[in-house]
Image: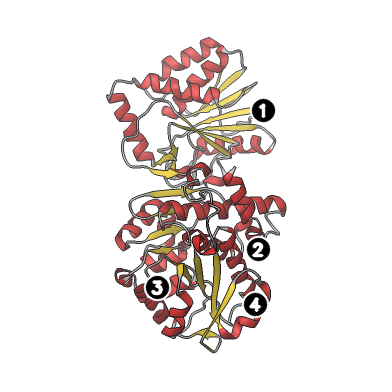
Amino acid sequence: MEPVVTAEVMRVSDKAAIAAGVSEGELILRAATALRQAYGYKGPVAVVAGPGNNGADGLVLARLLAEDGVPVELFMLEESGAPGWKARMKEALAAGAVLHYPDASVSFDGFPEIVDCLFGTGFHGEAAGLAKALIEAINRAHESGSFVVSADIPSGLSGTTGLGGSAVKADLTVAIQFYKTGLFMNRAKDHTGRVVACDIGIPLTGEAVYLPSKEDFRAVLRPREHYAHKGTYGYVTMIGGCAAYGGAVKLAAMSHAALRAGAGVSRLAVPSSIVPAVSPYILEATLCPMPDEGGFMRCDEDALAGAVRGAAAVAVGMGWGRAKDNEAILRFLLTHLTVPLLIDADGINTLAAMGTDVLREATCPVVLTPHPLEFQRLSGVPAAEAAADPVRHAKDFAEANGVTLLLKGTTTVISDGKQTLLVSRGCPGMATAGSGDVLSGILTGLLGWNEPTSLTVACGAYIAGLAGEIAERDVNPISMTSGDTARHVADAVSEMLR
């Protein structure tokens, strides 16, 4: 797993490395060398530099490129900068770099490669004036085919939140030492291009969250034994559906996703009145008709006990609607189950109406999978505030309520209050109805044969995101549906096992 840090943790780590005896100049040289090695520059290269340490990296990069015979020109935001600025500038010019102090009419026509060293990870707010003009000029060149490399983070974005106004659109972002949370949140994915982290010898000082790779999930997607049967890998029950929603196909897709994620048997517990609509869409799963009234599930404790009997994991809420008995059903599950309970969609809305204090009564491990508005209803934290710092809010909520929380977003945040993981898989085509239902099916399937850890939940998010990416390649981001994601779950698992 790769550590991911906030801008503040990176600042503290930098400071601690310098206090331990590594000079600031040496760290700047290492960062510039990492930028030099991250891409095969041919030139001419425009290095666009600001007055801070990010700009200092750019000055040294310009010198390294010039020394290697690569044509390079420096475009400076200001005429002075951080300590050592004059000496680094002198060295770059002596090596053959060409210097410019541009105005707002700046253009990067004629530069096939541009390196963005304007602002570092400590930037916040919105770029203005000449800085904004430089960013817009970089983006015009990018649209015309120039390859853009950003140092640490595309200038104009916050290194912690990924928020900002005008921001560089890069093809490659070279994170110095550690990935930053702002590289994955909010607007970042529309600006970063490919992201790589380059180790320059700075020890971590402070708290990090972690970005797992597919290799980290081998413990979840472990080899299967011949001496096994369907019960070995878990019966799972998914409770949801109502007559008010045409969710037959969604429920079937969830069931299919649970089986593709490795569950031994998938059982759908749905209101009796929608069984005829659901049954034509399922082959491998079993149906458990539940007492209903007006197309909504009634709380019949004997029927509920039968639906979850023998289950290794249970999910509730998908397509459930808003019904008078939902609170009673959810309370029964929370206080009678001992196996993992995943609560999604209308299950989360029901929990929000009940109040999260009920979670203290839970006899089972609980996994919650809200999107930002559902999280707002659960936690009281405004969606915009949670989006600005999803890592902290997810961790705090999970810790306070003793749950594992999966907070949906451009990057998924998973936390049990002790370990926090980020999953950055997925694609624009997944912004369609039912994607969350498919995710719930995958998660329930995994929980049927794995411990309910943050790693297991992160594995489900990774499978769903990767399946979506494969589906988008097979279809297109505009026409893609959640069913396309469900159909590619097996392909995603296969890729993860390679």
**Image coordinates for residue 428, horizontal then vertical, percent:** 61, 54
**Where's the N terminus, which quadrant?**
top left
Give the residue displayed 41% in from the left and 57% down from the top: 451
Foreground disc of the pair 3, 4 = 4
Q: Is the residue 191 above or below the residue 439 in the image?
A: above
Residue flagged by tag 4: what amino acid is it?
A: Ser
Q: Using a 10 Å C-alpha cutoff, classify the residue at mark 2 as few (fewer than 14 neighbours), some (14 to 19) or many (20 or more).
A: many
Q: CA distance from mark 1 to mark 4?
A: 58 Å
Which residue is tagged 2? 483
Residue flagged by tag 3: what amino acid is it?
A: Leu
Q: Sequence-wise, which precedes: disc 3 or disc 2?
A: 3
Q: Sequence-wise, which precedes: disc 4 or disc 2?
A: 4
Q: CA distance from mark 1 to mark 3?
A: 54 Å
Which residue is tagged 1? 112
Question: Who is closer to the viewer here, 87 or 360?
Answer: 360
Which element type, helix, strand or loop, lies under badge 1?
loop
Q: CA distance from mark 4 to mark 2?
A: 17 Å
- Residue farthest front in this picture: 227
Q: Is residue 260 visible?
A: yes
Question: Who is closer to the viewer here, 221 or 453?
Answer: 221
Dots 3 and 2: beta carbons under 8 Å?
A: no
Residue flagged by tag 1: what amino acid is it?
A: Pro
- How many marks do you count on the picture? 4
Which residue is tagged 4? 279
**Where's the C terminus, which quadrant?**
top right
Dots 1 and 2: beta carbons under 8 Å?
A: no
Residue flagged by tag 2: what amino acid is it?
A: Gly
Foreground disc of the pair 1, 4 = 4
Residue 83 horizontal side relative to residue 467, left or right: left
Dots 3 and 4: beta carbons under 8 Å?
A: no
